Amino acid sequence: MSKSIHSFVRVSAPCGEVFPYFFSLNLLQVFKGFWFVPNIESAFFKIKSAKPGSERLIYFEDCSTAVCQLFDFTPQVSFSVQIDNFTSSCFIGLEAMRCHFSFSDSGSGMTQVNSHYQFKMHSPFWNLLFEVFFSSDYATKT
């Protein structure tokens, strides 16, 4: 069972500035605002040492962890990350989260950023709960 979210944004800056910014983002920010999700205490990957296959242990403020793996990394073009092995009970229904970002020059110093988040759930029950919580939260924010 999985759910996907696709989005894009055009940024008024060259890709050389936009790519490092998005690469350094906390990819779990998509859950920000959910009262039951702990904040992250550690950073993701550093662009200087980024290599496909690299793994990092993510630490949350509730002392739980998750594993973050860099699957794809093509500077200024794209990157893909998977986060799984969540130890927090807050993520009990989430098996893995995969994020893919791609970047393209839109002309006139603009960069288009396309993102695709895929959430793999442990069962149909958790898939339904995810849809209810996620849909209701984002419906109130837009």
Image: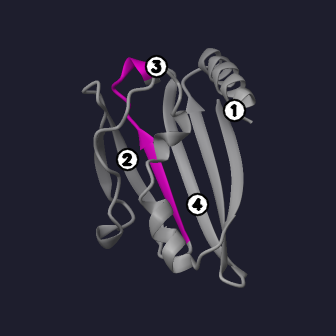
Residue hosting label 4: 101
Q: Are marks 3 and 1 in contact (CB under 8 Å)?
A: no
Instruction: Specify which label sits upstream in the sequence, 3 or 1.
Output: 3
CA separation in Å, label 3 and label 1: 17 Å
Relative side of 36 to 5, left or right = left
Q: Magenta stretch containing residue 88, yes or no?
A: yes
User: Residue 59 sits in which quadrant?
Assistant: top left
Q: Is residue 61 left or right of residue 85?
A: left
Q: Tell me the CA gap for discs 3 and 4.
A: 26 Å
Number of residues whose C-alpha sits closer than 10 Å to that of mark 3, classed few (under 14), some (14–19) or many (20 or more): few
Q: Secondary structure at mark 4?
A: strand
Q: Which residue is mark 2?
A: 68
Q: Badge 4: how crowded within 10 Å, few (<14), some, or many (20+)?
A: many
* Residue 54, percent from left and from top: 32, 59
Q: Measure how far apart labels 3 and 2 are at the Cα level.
A: 20 Å
Left or right side of 25 for 125 = right
Disc 1: which residue: 141
Q: Nearer the viewer, mark 3 or mark 2?
A: 3
Image: 6 above or below 16: above
Q: Secondary structure at mark 2?
A: strand
- Residue under pointer 3: 36
- Front-most of 96 and 42? 42
* Tag 3 near tag 2, CB within 8 Å: no
Identify the residue at horizontal 59%, vertical 18% (top origin): 126
Counting residues from the N terminus, which is met first, the one under dot 1 or under dot 4?
4
